[in-house]
Image: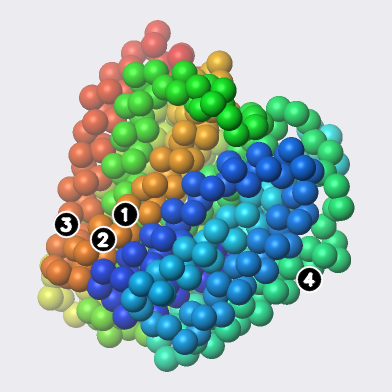
Amino acid sequence: MVQNGVAPILFPLASHGGTDSGLSYAAFALTGLFAPIFGSWGDRKGRHRDLLIWGSVFAAIAFLPLCLLSDGPAFILFAALAGLGITAATTAGNVLAIAGLDENLWNGRIGLLQRVVSTGQVLGLLMAGLMAARHSHIAFALTFAALLGAAALAVAYAPASTIRAAHAKPLARPAMGGEAGAPGIQQNSHHASFAQLSAFLAVISRPLAQFLLVWFIAYTAMNGIAVLFPVAMTQHYGMPPIMPALAYALGVCASLATYGRVSKWTTSFGPVKILMAGIGLRLVLFALLAAFSLSHASFAGFAILVTFALIQFVWPLLAVGTIAMSVALARQAPGESIGLYNATSSIASSVGPAIAGVIFGLCGFSILSISACFTVAISALLAWLWFGRVAANAKTARYFHF
């Protein structure tokens, strides 16, 4: 609820727009890079339960001062500290969700986790949307209380010890719909060391590097729009925050039913075509977003809301396609390639809102929409040049199939 629902709405809106709107969420998101450190420590010590409890408590304590702050360096600092606690808790939570289960039962449990987290995201979006305009301090206080409640539930119900297969380690965030959540699967487990760094670097082939660059460019623009969207709707169109939050939530809810179908399409057509379809649809929708933002029509605000909901709806194509591409391009070390993919996503989800906040503060939402559309177009062009002809060739396309 907090990581994927409250934070993307409340941080930008509580910062009153402009540069700080992007920087506060950027600081929150960048802490996702610490997930491998928390995961390795939990694996070595067998203390994922402690990570879940104390990560929740630490995040709660960091949220409490935000009740009194609205912007500035202190606000950004506490946002980062809150993200650090959330990262520790969610990393441990993904492990505990499958603790003690046979591997053949993991997929079912992960699917259940996805539904639960997505429900939390929707509730968080709605709560933040309802309270962000005039009662953001109360929303931060409720977030503080919710995180303490999460810690109490962990004390009461989380497994005391973790017995896991040595080759599996969940990522920082479970697979889910929407821009705020990064997709997750199991990855190889290694202790943090120079050997692990060497293993990461060893799998960076030219195709994998090209894919990561395409994804970084695309996701930087996509995440920047997602985080600044509520601010734009409230400032430019005078909407109550619940309206963009509701559009966000409806898009995420509708997308959940499509994951199974997209997974089958990926098996049938290969991840390249699925990824390019996702980027292509996002490009069309971003172009519509830019066109409506430049329009002075009376229905422009409503049209932008609908377009944004559709942007969230097509997320599964990107979520499934990017993970499948990561695995296909480094079959000998899928864990390392997924780790690189998640690090790329984490950096993009921090850089995107920071840049978007500057553009929005200086030039407004229309220029931000046009900039995002142009950036996604660059990623689409690079994807076609580097992978499109490969996917179209019947012989080489098999390389990208499972």
Q: Closer to the camera, 128 or 199?
A: 199
Upstream in the sequence, badge 4 or badge 3? Answer: 4
The residue depicted at 26 percent of the width and 37 percent of the height is 380
Task: Give the distance between the C-alpha atoms of the residues marked 3 and 1, in whole angstroms.
Answer: 14 Å
Report the residue marked by disc 2. 356
Of badges 4 and 3, the one in the foreground is: 4
Relative to 236, is 395 above or below? above
Asked whether disc 4 touches disc 1, contact meaning CB atoms under 8 Å apart, the reply is no
Q: Residues within 10 Å of mark 4 (few under 14, many from 20)?
A: some
Q: Is residue 154 visible?
A: yes
Q: Residues within 10 Å of mark 3 (few under 14, many from 20)?
A: some
Q: Which corner quadrant holds the N terminus?
A: bottom right
Mark 2 is on which residue type? Ala
Which quarter of the figure has residue 377?
top left
Asked whether disc 4 touches disc 2, contact meaning CB atoms under 8 Å apart, the reply is no
Report the residue marked by disc 1. 352
Upstream in the sequence, badge 2 or badge 3? Answer: 2
Q: Which corner quadrant holds the C terminus?
A: top right
Task: Give the distance between the C-alpha atoms of the residues marked 2 and 1, in whole angstroms.
Answer: 6 Å
Report x, y in % for residue 34: 54, 48
The residue depicted at 41 percent of the width and 74 percent of the height is 75
Task: Give the distance between the C-alpha atoms of the residues marked 4 and 2, in whole angstroms.
Answer: 37 Å
Report x, y in % for residue 305: 34, 69
Report the residue marked by disc 3. 370
Judging from the image, what secondary structure is the residue with disc 1 in? helix
Report the residue marked by disc 4. 152
Relative to 149, is 26 above or below? above
Of badges 2 and 3, the one in the foreground is: 2
Judging from the image, what secondary structure is the residue with disc 3 in? helix
Relative to 222, 173 lies left or right: right
Task: Give the distance between the C-alpha atoms of the residues marked 4 and 3, in whole angstroms.
Answer: 46 Å
Mark 4 is on which residue type? Ala
